[in-house]
Image (cartoon, rainbow, N blue to C red):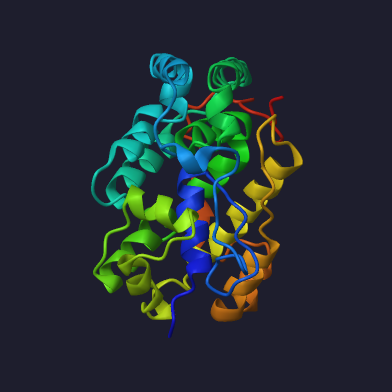
């Protein structure tokens, strides 16, 4: 059965937290027009950062958020030349095993990124939006990328992407993510479309859809000064038409959990709603 690019689009985009409007077409491409980055991002590299943003991002690597959000691991995703599965697994494994970020550290880091990466955020640069979204909406983004199978603790993002790679024979690279977000179907995308739905209609995919929809709604409600007009409703509905109505229930399936903070994590970490203006 045809693989829904709506799902792989959602999974890919939440991996880097760069969300675009992808509604109106059964394969995730808006009717009558390609997906296009906002602002002037269509004319610039959506991955690389401006000089001032690079300095601000580098500064994060030496602070608390480098440890609690595994910023080194996140940076490695944007430097990957081949498959993203291993870098994503390394990132979430480190971030989900870390003690929670303090609100003070998140506030300081998000202010630095908002100030020094202003043009990058306005243009929708993937790396800048990823960093800023994690910092300003830490709890809901962590809940999404720390979903894992209860039985073996395998994390959902790399599990789903790895299964799609194995079935399609194609690698999910940063270039594929950028092309798909831009609305350009590549040979790899066509291979993804041929993957049997049993590959991706899994409890982990269900969990990703549930938690990413919550994350997207939270960012949309409080975008913290960045352009953000994406809503997950249509994407979730179209995914559910392939994978079943349960994918719209806003629940975690029984086989999946969100990885707990380590017991050494300081009590009274980030509040349940840690939106940072």
Q: Nearer the viewer, residue 149 or 11?
A: 11
Residue 185 at what x, y percent from top left?
41, 65
Q: Quadrant of residue 246?
A: bottom right
- The residue most toward the right is 221
Residue 196 against residue 168 in the figure, above or below: below
Q: Say if residue 155 shows up in the picture.
A: no
From the image, which quarter does the C terminus lie in?
top right
> What residue appears at the point 52 percent right and 44 percent down from the top-left corner?
17
Look at the image and tell me in which quarter the N terminus lies. bottom left
Image-based side of 243 in relation to 82, left or right: right
Q: Nearer the viewer, residue 32 or 221?
A: 32
Q: Position of residue 78 (x, y in %)?
A: 35, 38
> Where is residue 120 shown, x and y percent of the image?
52, 29
Q: Residue 63 vs residue 22: left or right?
A: left
Asked where in the image residue 114 lies, by quadrant, the reply is: top right
Could you say which is closer to the camera, residue 49 or residue 242? Answer: 49
**As drawn, which residue projects farthest toward the bottom?**
1
Number of numbered discs on residues:
0
Q: Residue at 65% of width from left, 48% of height from top? A: 216
Q: Is residue 150 visible?
A: yes
Name which residue lies at 47% across and 40% down. 43
Q: In x, y percent, where is residue 237? A: 66, 71
Residue drawn at point x = 49 percent, y = 47 percent: 145
């Amino acid at each position: 059965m045809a693989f829904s690019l709506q799902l792989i689009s959602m999974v890919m985009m939440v991996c880097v937290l760069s969300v675009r409007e992808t509604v109106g077409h059964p394969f995730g491409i808006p009717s009558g027009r390609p997906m296009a980055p906002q602002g002037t991002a269509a004319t610039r590299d959506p991955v690389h950062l401006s000089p001032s943003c690079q300095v601000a991002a580098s500064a994060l690597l030496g602070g608390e958020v480098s440890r609690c959000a595994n910023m080194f691991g996140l940076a490695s995703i944007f430097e990957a030349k081949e498959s993203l599965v291993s870098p994503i697994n390394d990132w979430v494994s480190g971030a989900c095993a870390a003690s929670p970020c303090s609100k003070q550290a998140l506030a300081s880091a998000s202010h630095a990124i908002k100030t020094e990466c202003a043009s990058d955020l306005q243009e929708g640069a993937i790396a800048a939006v990823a960093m800023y979204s994690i910092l300003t909406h830490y709890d809901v983004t962590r809940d999404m990328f720390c979903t894992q199978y209860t039985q073996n603790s395998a994390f959902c993002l790399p599990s789903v992407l790895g299964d799609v790679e194995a079935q399609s024979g194609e690698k999910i690279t940063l270039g594929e993510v950028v092309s798909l977000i831009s609305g350009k179907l590549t040979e790899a995308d066509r291979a993804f479309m041929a993957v049997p739905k049993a590959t991706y209609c899994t409890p982990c995919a269900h969990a990703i859809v549930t938690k990413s929809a919550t994350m997207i709604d939270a960012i949309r409600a409080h975008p913290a000064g960045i352009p953000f007009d994406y809503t997950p409703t249509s994407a979730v509905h179209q995914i559910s038409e392939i994978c079943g109505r349960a994918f719209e229930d806003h629940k975690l399936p029984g086989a999946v959990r969100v990885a707990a903070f380590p017991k050494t994590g300081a009590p009274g970490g980030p509040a349940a709603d840690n939106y940072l203006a």
